[in-house]
Structure formats: structure tokens, C-alpha cells
Amino acid sequence: MARPDDDHVPRAIVGDDGEVLAVAHVSPDAGPEVFEALRAVAEVVRRDMEADDTPERRARWEAAQARIGGRNARLLGCGG
């Protein structure tokens, strides 16, 4: 992992279409193979997230957020 005192710099990991997929702190001497590997990882994560984005999952997430909001309101004494 990069430490604040090392020489790693933030660099954009860009997809084939020019879209920024991620930003990674990498060594200034990182070659193209490093960026290809990072791009492959970012693409896998993106595909996995898209596969998980279903109406059922979104409905569960929204219901959970509503429960959390209700609980917070009760804890703060401003709703029930």
C-alpha cells in the first residue's frame, strides 16, 4: 500500500472508450502492463456490479434505507 512519504502518484485507469474507470496510486515507473492489469481488474468489478444491479436488489436496498431512516428518527425522538 502506498504511504504518504513514497513517490507513488495518482493516475487514472482509463477504459477503451476513454472513460476513467478508477484512480490508482502507482509508482512513477509503472509500465503499460501495470495499467493493463489495473484496467482488467476495474472492468471485472464494473461487470460484477452491473450484474448485481437488479430491480430486486434495488428494492431491498431502498427498504433497508427506509428502515435505517425510521430507526434513526426514533433514536433522535423525532418520529416513529
Image (tube, grey):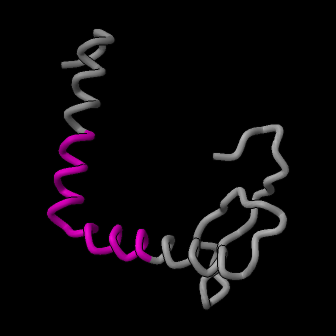
Q: Is residue 26 above or below residue 66?
A: below
User: In percent of the image, x 43 and y 72: which residue is there?
Assistant: 46
Q: Is residue 10 left or right of residue 22?
A: right
Q: Position of residue 59 (x, y in %)?
A: 18, 56
Res 79 quadrant in image: top left
Q: Is residue 11 above or below residue 35?
A: above
Q: Is residue 42 left or right of residue 73?
A: right
Observer-nearest of 50 and 1: 1
Observer-nearest of 24 and 53: 24
Res 76 quadrant in image: top left
The single residue placed furthest to the top in the displayed view is: 77
Is 16 covered by the magenta stretch? no
User: In percent of the image, x 58 and y 71: which residue is there?
Assistant: 38
User: In percent of the image, x 33 and y 71: which residue is there?
Assistant: 48
Main structural element of the magenta stretch: helix, strand or loop?
A: helix
Q: Is residue 40 left or right of residue 3?
A: left
User: In percent of the image, x 61 and y 81: which residue is there?
Assistant: 36
Q: Position of residue 27 (x, y in %)?
A: 78, 60
Res 5 quadrant in image: top right
The single residue placed furthest to the bottom in the displayed view is: 16
Q: Is residue 37 above or below residue 59?
A: below
Q: Is residue 6 left or right of residue 74?
A: right
Q: Position of residue 56 (x, y in %)?
A: 14, 63
Is 58 covered by the magenta stretch? yes
Observer-nearest of 52 and 54: 52
**Total residue callouts:** 0
Q: Residues in magenta?
A: 44-65
Q: Position of residue 66 (x, y in %)?
A: 23, 38
Query: Where the C terminus falls, by quadrant?
Result: top left
